[in-house]
């Protein structure tokens, strides 16, 4: 039976979300923590009927859905719930975690981000004519406290303006781009899936080098591939049928990261800057989303 035929048999007017199970589908990033709460369920239940209607309209037998938004906004949980609701409706789904596809493990990528920011910030400071022995010594202390990206520090040290502008610009040119993320590999997976390849090697990448490997996954009876990822709306991705944006703010995503223990520096000035840059990219891609859900759970697109 074709995907559209199975979905046509689903009565959305009388659909009720099934009770949760321990063996629900979830993302495939090693060691990732997923805690599904009531808010996640409410949002997934708001998205699901709309997503099903769009899947019906595709007319294809294989579909790819992207759930994207700010770091820690609940992408993993909502993607898991959408996959679970599909499976309970007779449609097989698989959740891909986009966090498996940076070129570097988190520790090394964080170091690369910091190095890009600081090296280019220093170049900018030199170019501005404000680099001298005094600013060098002050920067050494700011680096120890990791407060050099903090905009508030410009009040005390006005010369930090050039430093932060140059560093932030360089970081923007790295975050979420093909320099950081392996979009080619993900696009190849999407193409294989849509072409009906039954078994596909999918990457696994944890938080240390010894957790970097591939697993051959049987997708022969999988109808819908769901990718959950901050960069799931990026223009470099090809083949996504239904992009779903979960709206949030950098402040809200910081709290989510803290709850999920994504890193140990959720309140740092550098993390704040990274989240702000990511949010700018998300805002720029909002027009390309087929479904947009607000932080409060309001369906912004399509309008209710």
Image (spheres, rainbow, N blue to C red):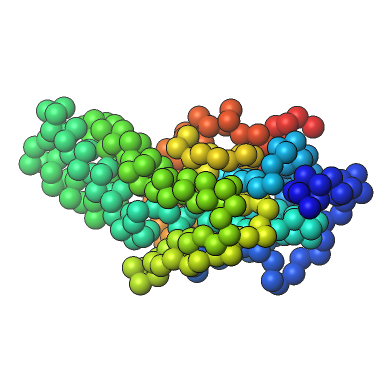
Which of 82 and 75 lies nearest the eye of the viewer? 82
Q: Is residue 287 above or below residue 5?
A: above
Q: Residue 116 appears in which quarter of the rendering? A: top left
Residue furthest right in the image: 14
Q: Is residue 109 above or below residue 209?
A: above
Using residue 136 as the reference point, say whether residue 275 is left or right of it: right
Residue 38 % position (x, y): 74, 57
Q: Is residue 94 above or below residue 252?
A: below
Residue name at image x 45 percent, y 37 percent: 236
Which of 25 and 126 lies nearest the eye of the viewer? 25
Residue name at image x 55 percent, y 40 percent: 239
Which of 73 and 216 lies nearest the eye of the viewer? 216
Residue name at image x 58 percent, y 41 percent: 240
Q: Residue 272 appears in which quarter of the rendering? A: top left
Residue 13 % position (x, y): 90, 44
Residue 248 shows in the view: no
| Quadrant location of the C terminus in the rendered image | top right
Residue 194 % position (x, y): 59, 47
């Amino acid at each position: 039976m074709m995907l559209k035929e199975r979905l046509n048999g689903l009565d959305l007017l009388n659909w009720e979300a099934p009770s949760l199970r321990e063996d629900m589908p979830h993302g495939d990033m090693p060691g990732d923590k997923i805690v599904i709460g009531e808010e996640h369920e409410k949002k997934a239940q708001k998205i699901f009927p709309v997503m099903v209607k769009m899947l019906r309209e595709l007319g294809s037998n294989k579909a790819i859905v992207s759930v994207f938004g700010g770091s820690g906004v609940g992408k993993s949980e909502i993607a898991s719930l959408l996959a679970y609701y599909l499976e309970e409706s007779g449609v097989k789904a698989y959740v891909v975690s986009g966090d498996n596809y940076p070129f570097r493990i988190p520790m090394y990528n964080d170091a690369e981000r910091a190095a890009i920011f600081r090296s280019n910030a220093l170049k900018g400071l030199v170019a501005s004519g404000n680099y001298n022995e005094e600013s060098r010594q002050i920067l050494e202390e700011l680096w120890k406290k990791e407060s050099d990206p903090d905009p508030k520090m410009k009040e005390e040290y006005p010369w930090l303006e050039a430093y932060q502008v140059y560093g932030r610009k360089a970081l923007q040119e790295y975050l979420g781009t093909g320099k950081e993320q392996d979009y080619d590999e993900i696009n190849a997976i999407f193409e294989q899936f849509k072409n009906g390849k039954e078994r596909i090697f999918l990457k696994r990448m944890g938080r240390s080098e010894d957790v970097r490997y591939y697993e051959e996954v049987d997708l022969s009876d999988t109808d819908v591939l769901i990718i959950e990822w901050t960069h799931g709306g990026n223009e470099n991705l090809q083949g996504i049928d239904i992009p779903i944006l979960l709206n949030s703010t950098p402040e809200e995503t910081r709290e989510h990261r803290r709850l999920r223990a994504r890193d140990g520096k959720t309140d740092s000035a550098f993390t704040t800057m990274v989240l702000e840059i990511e949010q700018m990219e998300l805002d720029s891609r909002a027009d390309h989303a087929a479904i947009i859900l607000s932080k409060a759970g309001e369906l912004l697109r399509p309008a209710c």
